[in-house]
Image (tube, grey):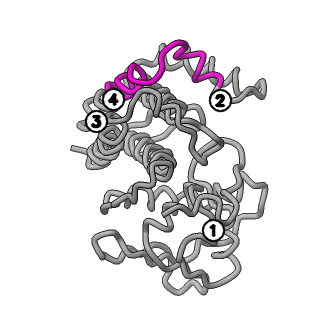
Amino acid sequence: MLHQARDFYNESKDLYKILVHLASSELNTETLFKNWTFNDIIRHLYVWNYAANLSLLDGDSWKNFSTKINKHINTGKELKKFEINLLAGIEEKALLNLWKNSYELLYENFKNENPKRRIKWVGPDMSVISSISARHMETWAHGQAIYDALKIKRINNDSIINIVIIGNNTFKWSYLVNNNKVPFEAPFLKLVSPSGKIWEFNNRKNSNKIEGLAEDFCKVVTQVRNIKDVNLKLEGDIAKEWMAIAQCFAGKANKPPAPGVRKIL
């Protein structure tokens, strides 16, 4: 079984447990992520779970979906509008249940797949393991906006290694998407996992270094916190530059929240 699929499922389930007890009206609560409501976030997670499932199982349906989404994006329209139109009229508890069904189905379909199998995506093709890891990353990142809005301190576990890996692997992407020259090599990472393990990545001899909690690194690369609002120790200009522009997700260049804006808990 792919542990990344299990990690995605558990992350989704933990978020659902929080949301299911809210009144329908509370699902319209705004967050500090672009003023998206809980409904907007749930809808977004559902749509891209649905898309990932299509890419895994059904080439023709995936082709139809990707054509529509690319046409929408290329005309400069907001992604959220595409998602609202796709699920027109489905809100609150009905939407919450639809999302729950989507993550349960995605877990069942991905858990025993060949991790190296290549599947289609909106951008370049990706492996099965990269696809389900990306779903975990996005659920974790968008979920943080909900935890913040409800003033719940999230208790992370070592499954965030999936997000750390994506964050480290998108070092080059963070520069390219911002039209910046890519440095020769990524800084050395020395991160402490939620359980206290030490996770190390890249060349130890690199003078550019990033040290601290793995969850702080995850918050920066997913842009749910500004680098100034976490306790990462940065050494070297490249380490500082990367953490100022880090972006582990696809799409156009995004800026992290301003310092203090999302420093909640």
Whole-number angstrom distance, CA of label 1 to CA of label 4: 33 Å
Q: CA distance from mark 1 to mark 2?
A: 26 Å
Tell which circle, 1 or 3, labels the residue nearer the N-terminal end. 3
Cβ–Cβ under 8 Å for marks 1 and 4: no
Residue at numbered disc 2: 79
Q: Nearer the viewer, mark 1 or mark 3?
A: 1
Which residue range is magenta in the image?
A: 81-101
Question: What is the C-alpha distance between the residues marked 1 and 3?
Answer: 34 Å
Q: Position of residue 203 (x, y in %)?
A: 51, 79
Query: Which of the pair 181/17 is nearer the observer?
Result: 17
Q: CA distance from mark 3 to mark 4?
A: 21 Å
Query: What residue appears at the point 52 percent right and 16 percent down from the top-left corner?
Result: 87
User: Is residue 96 located in the magenta-colored stretch of the structure?
Assistant: yes
Our reading of the magenta stretch's main secondary structure is helix
Is 30 rendered above or below residue 205?
above
User: Counting residues from the N terminus, which is met first, the one under dot 1 or under dot 2?
Assistant: 2
Which sits earlier in the primary sequence, circle 1 or circle 4? 4
Horizontal side of 114 relative to 245 (left or right) equals: left
Q: Is residue 82 magenta?
A: yes
Q: What amino acid does circle 1 point to?
A: Met
* Element under disc 3: loop
Q: Are marks 1 and 2 in contact (CB under 8 Å)?
A: no
Q: Residue at x 59, y 56 (%)?
A: 223
* SS for callout 1: helix
Pointer 3 or 4: first along the chain: 4
For the residues bearing labels 3 and 4, Cβ distance under 8 angstroms: no
Mark 3 or mark 2: whose residue is earlier in sequence: 2
Q: Which residue is mark 4?
A: 100
Q: Position of residue 242 (x, y in %)?
A: 65, 68
* Picture disc at residue 113: 3
